[in-house]
Image: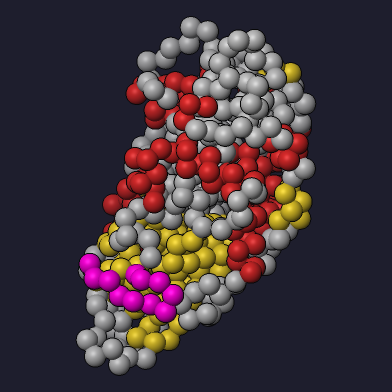
């Protein structure tokens, strides 16, 4: 890799699929600028349809496939999202050439637990306005902790002994009062689109919501400690098939809320249409399909729903989706000079879900084979893994870059801006700029980022940040001039 300077910051040159001319005398045309968010996980931390107690077993390898079910910073996600949107408002260009963002794209897990109130909160953040989600009664609230015992979660209250206090987690005695006031979001203020991830439509991102879970979700009782004597041989497999077995004894009374009811894809789509998200229409709602195209001036953003119909957190696609994608990309190929950016929640390495018995489901290699037939595709934007990573995918049509952007809920709490340029010799250049929200110290958005950093730990944080080859980079791809 080589370091190539830019007007604002040093960037690494990714020469996997092409390289610029040595004379540097080329003309560049900007084709599109996309701001990529992923894995916000806007959530209701008090919902009875949550399984935070699993986090207390994080030390046991048997339970790790179900992590994370709880994070100390999770109630503060709306503040982190609002801070990012404020940063976009203060500098809507924030790009190499100072050009405005054409599209803000959220690639799934925008909410956490397939609940109606979470969906309304996410859309309110995008539209602008005050967002309030409950916090009293969740696992951060240790008001009913036994005297002299250590609370197994982080407690912001100094008077409560907390299991995480020895890791430097702070005391924030006015935490509940500040969170209860909610956050005022400025809204995205730009054209935007989003697609569903596994957490948008599945309980805790893994299980289909059955009748037992739906009844518990809207009720007034919540469990916060592990069920007595519960020791499944394969926790992940059992959770996917029978999640109701994981409901802890309801030892805590909370305020019940009918808005915690589960949602399905049709309602998710309908709410996005009403909120003004690009790509979807009444026809998408009617056929319950989140496969859609957002047309920018010179680039088509092709959104593909990679959720697996039988549950589990990993993804797959249907054969009919592959046929549709092939047709869409063929039309784009036939339009001189037009490029395509594919977007989905799961990337190639996460399209591995074989759960259930649907014979038409296809995995990452099948999707990759379709995409590699089409030279119009220069990038594939994904999330799901909560890491920054840029992977070159060479292929017979010239290849593309698979660009994974880290999450907002976890460290490093960053967004990515991607600018697509065409050189006068046909070379395509994609410039990546990764940024935090820059919220001031003392704000709840800054506290969210501090808690996320402490929760991740050094090794995991380093992985999620990515290397210098995954963050501020210039990616080059050879394409013939139209």
Question: Is 355 drawn above or below residue 303 in the view shown?
Answer: above
Q: Residue 249: x percent and y percent? A: 62, 13
Question: Is 268 drawn above or below residue 432 in the view shown?
Answer: above
Q: Residue 62: x percent and y percent? A: 36, 21
Q: How is the image coloured?
A: secondary structure
Residue at 59% across, 72% down: 92
Q: Residue 98: x percent and y percent? A: 52, 80
The answer to whether residue 398 is seen in the rendering is: no
Principal secondary structure, stretch drawn in magenta: loop
Q: Dividing the image into 4 quarters, which one contains the C terminus?
A: bottom left
Q: Is residue 4 magenta?
A: yes
Q: Is residue 141 magenta?
A: no
Task: State which quadrant residue 77 falls in.
Answer: top right
User: Horizontally, is 317 left or right of 116 in the view?
Assistant: left
The mark tally for this picture is 0
Residue at 39% across, 22% down: 59
Q: Which residues are magenta?
A: 1-11
Q: Residue 99: x percent and y percent? A: 53, 80
Residue at 77% across, 43% down: 181
- Camera-side residue: 145 or 248? 145
Residue at 27% across, 62% down: 393
- Camera-side residue: 41 or 201? 41
Task: State which quadrant residue 350 falls in.
Answer: top left
Question: Is 362 drawn above or below residue 94 in the view shown?
Answer: above
- Camera-side residue: 415 or 371? 415
């Amino acid at each position: 890799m080589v370091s190539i300077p830019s007007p604002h910051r040093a960037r690494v040159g990714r020469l996997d699929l092409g390289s610029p001319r040595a004379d540097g005398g080329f003309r560049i045309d900007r084709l599109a600028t996309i701001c990529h968010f992923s894995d916000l996980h806007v959530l209701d931390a008090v919902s009875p349809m949550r399984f935070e107690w699993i986090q207390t077993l994080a030390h046991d390898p048997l339970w790790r496939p179900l992590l994370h079910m709880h994070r100390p910073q999770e109630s503060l996600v709306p503040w982190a999202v609002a801070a990012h949107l404020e940063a976009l408002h203060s500098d809507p260009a924030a790009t190499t050439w100072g050009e405005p963002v054409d599209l803000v794209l959220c690639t799934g897990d925008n909410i956490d637990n397939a609940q109606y109130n979470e969906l309304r909160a996410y859309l309110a953040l995008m539209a602008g306005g005050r967002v309030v989600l409950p916090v009293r009664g969740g696992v951060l609230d240790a008001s009913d902790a036994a005297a002299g015992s250590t609370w197994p979660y982080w407690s912001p209250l100094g008077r409560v002994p907390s299991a995480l206090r020895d890791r430097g987690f702070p005391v924030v005695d006015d935490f509940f009062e500040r969170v209860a006031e909610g956050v005022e979001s400025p809204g995205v203020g730009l054209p935007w689109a989003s697609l569903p991830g596994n957490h948008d439509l599945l309980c805790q991102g893994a299980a289909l919501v059955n009748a037992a879970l739906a009844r518990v979700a809207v009720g007034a009782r919540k469990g916060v400690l592990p069920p007595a004597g519960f020791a499944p041989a394969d926790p992940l497999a059992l959770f996917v098939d029978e999640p109701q077995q994981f409901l802890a004894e309801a030892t805590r009374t909370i305020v019940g809320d009918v808005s915690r009811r589960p949602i399905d894809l049709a309602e998710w789509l309908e709410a996005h249409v009403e909120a003004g998200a690009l790509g979807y229409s009444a026809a998408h709602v009617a056929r319950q399909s989140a496969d859609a195209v957002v047309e920018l001036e010179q680039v088509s953003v092709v959104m593909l729903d990679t959720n697996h119909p039988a549950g589990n957190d990993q993804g797959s696609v249907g054969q009919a989706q592959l046929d549709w994608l092939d047709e869409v990309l063929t039309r784009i190929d036939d339009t001189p000079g037009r490029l395509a950016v594919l977007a989905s929640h799961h990337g190639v390495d996460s399209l591995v879900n074989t759960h259930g018995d649907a014979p038409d489901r296809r995995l990452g290699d099948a999707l990759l084979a379709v995409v590699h037939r089409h030279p119009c595709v220069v990038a594939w934007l994904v999330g799901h893994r909560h890491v920054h990573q840029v992977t070159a995918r060479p292929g017979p049509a010239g290849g593309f870059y698979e660009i994974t952007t880290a999450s907002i809920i976890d460290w490093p709490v960053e967004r990515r801006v991607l600018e697509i340029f065409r050189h006068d010799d046909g070379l395509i250049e994609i410039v990546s700029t990764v940024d935090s929200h820059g919220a001031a110290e003392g704000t709840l958005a800054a506290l969210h980022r501090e808690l996320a950093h402490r929760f991740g730990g050094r090794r995991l944080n380093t992985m999620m940040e990515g290397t210098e080859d995954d963050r501020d980079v210039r990616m080059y791809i050879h394409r013939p001039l139209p």
